[in-house]
Amino acid sequence: MTSSLCRAATFPREPGPADPDWSSFRSLNHPARHLRHAGLALRVDEAVNAGDRADATFRVGY
């Protein structure tokens, strides 16, 4: 696997933009983009408004 592919597939966990007690996953390759859900699908998009920030905030359970 190339280093560029590894970077493209890496989403470090950080506090959620809508709730810092929950989690968000920011693209390492494109720092303005977060993993988010929309229409029952996962997407990689910028979180520019309150709805986007909520979509990019996840409760991680174990």
Image (cartoon, helix red, strand yellow):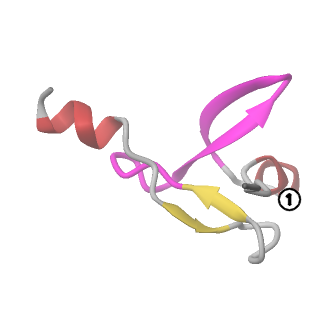
Quadrant the C terminus occupies: bottom right
Q: Which residue lies at the image location 33% right of the left edge and 36% below the top edge? A: 8
Q: Which residue is mark 1?
A: 50
Q: Which residue lies at the image location 37% right of the left edge and 36% below the top edge? A: 9
Q: Which residue lies at the image location 72% right of the left edge and 67% below the top edge? A: 17
Residue 60 on image: x %, y %: 73, 56
Place residue 45 in its image quadrant: top right
- Could you say which is closer to the camera, residue 34 or residue 15? 15
Magenta residues span 26-46
Residue 37 covered by magenta stretch: yes
Place residue 35 in its image quadrant: top right
Residue 15 on image: x %, y %: 64, 72
Quadrant the N terminus occupies: top left
Q: Amino acid at mark 1?
A: Ala
Query: Would residue 32 appear left or right of 52 to someone viewing this image?
Result: left
SS of the residue under disc 1: helix
Q: Is the residue 15 above or below the residue 49 in the image? A: below
Residue 5 on image: x %, y %: 23, 30
- Could you say which is closer to the camera, residue 23 or residue 53? 23
As drawn, the residue found furthest toward the bottom would be 20
Residue 8 covered by magenta stretch: no
Query: Would residue 2 appear left or right of 35 to someone viewing this image?
Result: left
Query: Would residue 48 appear left or right of 45 to someone viewing this image?
Result: right
Q: Which residue lies at the image location 80% right of the left edge and 30% below the top edge? A: 38
- Could you say which is closer to the camera, residue 11 or residue 45? 11
